[in-house]
Image (cartoon, rainbow, N blue to C red):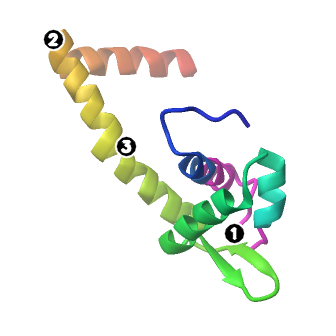
Amino acid sequence: MEFKSDKPIYRQIVDYAFAQVLSGAWPAGERVPSVRELAAEMAVNSHTVLKAFDYLTDLGVIASRRGMGYYLQPDAAAVVMAEQRRTFYSTTLEEVFDMMDMLGVTIEDIDRHYREHRAKQV
């Protein structure tokens, strides 16, 4: 995995985990890769992965089972979706609004481009 310099590595690992959850690659209730496995796969320090796992545990995405590793919580996808939406509205959309103001782009412009984009998808 290539890491970006504008975001802490542990947060990029969290984003990776979010993508795994939402894509179904990590099924609900199943064991997720261990800290060591993920650290080796991503070529990072295991403490960095542990920090990401602590964050995921605090969110309720994964839970540790003593002696067995980490497991995805049954409602992990809903938790991840809610967290991603919260981030989208509080960060991404705020940046878009600021850029819109700077460029004089209206919500009608955005709506038109969104509809054109969706039409191409179908």
Horizontal relation, residue 97 to residue 58: left or right: left
Using the numbered discs, state the Cα–Cα distance from disc 1 to disc 2 in whole angstroms.
44 Å
Horizontal relation, residue 56 to residue 64: left or right: left
What type is the residue that disc 2 sits on? Gly
Is the residue marked by circle 2 packed among few (<14), some (14-19), or many (20+) residues within 10 Å? few
Residue identifier under label 3: 88
Give the mark, 3 or 2, whose residue is nearer the N terminus.
Answer: 3
Query: x, y (%) of residue 30?
Result: 77, 72
Of the numbered discs in the image, which one, if any, rests on residue 28? 1
Point out the frontmost of discs 3 and 1: 3
Marks 1,2: beta carbons within 8 A? no
Tag 3's secondary structure? helix
Give the mark, 3 or 1, whose residue is nearer the N terminus.
Answer: 1
Residue identifier under label 2: 104
Point out the frontmost of discs 1 and 2: 2
The residue depicted at 67 percent of the width and 59 percent of the height is: 49
Residue 48 or residue 22, whichever sits in front: 48
